[in-house]
Amino acid sequence: MFSIIDANKGIYVILFNTKDVYPLKKSRTLILLLCLSTLLITMSKAQQRLVTFESYASLEKSFHLSSDTTYVVNFWATWCKPCVQELPYFEQFNTENKNKAVKVVLVSLDFAKQIDSHLIPFIEKRKLTSQVVFMADKNYNQWLNKVSPEWSGSIPATLLLRGQQRTFVEQEFDSAEELNTWIHSFIKS
Amino acid sequence: MFLLFSILFNLLGIHPSNTGYQVGDQAADFSLKNIDGKMVSMSSFPKAKGYIIVFTCNHCPYAVMYEDRLVELSKKYTAKGYQLIAINPNDPAVKPDDSYDKMIVRAKEKSFTFPYLFDEGQQIYPKFGATKTPHVFLLDKQKTVKYIGAIDNNAEDAAAVTERYLENAIAALESGKNPEPAVTKAIGCSIKVKK
């Protein structure tokens, strides 16, 4: 009856066949409106969870909005298997610490041309509850050192940050417990 | 505080320090099996003016994005005396796609024009301090490390590259200068090691 064509980036084309089984103009309009609103809700849900940052400086700024919040910043990508493997531990931590002064931010380093084909479907399929942001600045040599001079560039990598305090690891976590212990020792420091 | 974290990291088995080659260090030669079954070393190319050592692999999307560029680089710089040598540092027990047999297949598919060696036993990549694929080390004739890092500044789109770090570094060597920058960073896949 209708189809949605993903024409590149976020341009959605709706084809509505007027010769369809709805003889009344009224019901046809109603159906169209229903379809449209469902589509818009779905789109905004995905976009709500995916904020794009054009530069690392603007992303880092967002980590200083609250000086007593600990930001757990995980750098990952859908194509990175060890990243995807440890993601549930971050999700679990996020759920368990919802009411505390700690915020998990999953910074996607996915390829720009795979946002619609890989990243958004992944976020939806896994029903990720942590905030996912997309890092659009692909000139990595300009900003990896700002995350940490220790970062050679492999992912996964995770930054903990609270005000001026920060610590960083370039490694994957093997269990929720390992991640928990690491974050809590930072929070207590 | 720093000490506290160091102790904590050690307890957790996290070792952030990299003990591999830094710019200025002289690299030891290696002898690794090429895809044709023969052992290859840097000394297999006695006439080379320098060596482009690239840690790369089959499975990593970032490494794959650079395959065609490696072929181009090898064609361009072999003629100028710089030997490109690719080394797969991954443990195939962790990443079956990076097995020796699959290296042979991939090299054929992409018509590699350079040796593609297997770091069997994973002894060589830690000496270099490679941490990811792709990870490039440019050495001069004396095997002194002159440049470490990325090939260029745009993995996703070769046409949109604005800085050719590796080629600039070679050009610096050609004119008797030290590369600037001598170290660059880029995203890559972690080297796969059995736990």
Image: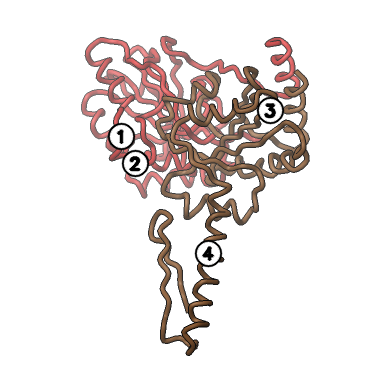
Chain colours: A brown, B red
Is residue B88 visible from the viewing direction of this image?
A: yes
Above or below A185: residue B73: below
Image quadrant where one finds the N terminus of chain B: top right
Q: Which amino acid, mark 2?
A: Asp
Pair 3/1: label in front:
3
Q: Kindly report the distance in space between the C-alpha atoms of the residues bearing marks 3 and 4.
A: 35 Å
Reading the image, the residue beneath label 2 is B157
In the rendered view, does A116 fall on the left or right side of A127?
Answer: left
Reading the image, the residue beneath label 1 is B161
Helix, strand or loop for disc 2: loop
Residue at x 58%, y 54% (from the top left corner):
A45
Helix, strand or loop for disc 4: helix
Reading the image, the residue beneath label 4 is A39
Pair 4/2: label in front:
4
Q: Which amino acid, mark 3?
A: Thr
Label 2: chain letter:
B
Q: Kindly report the distance in space between the C-alpha atoms of the residues bearing marks 3 and 1.
A: 36 Å
Q: Which amino acid, mark 4?
A: Leu
Residue A138 place in picture, x, y as percent: 42, 35
Reading the image, the residue beneath label 3 is A70
Within 10 Å of disc 4 (Cα), the crowding (few <14, some 14-19, many 20+) is some
Helix, strand or loop for disc 1: loop
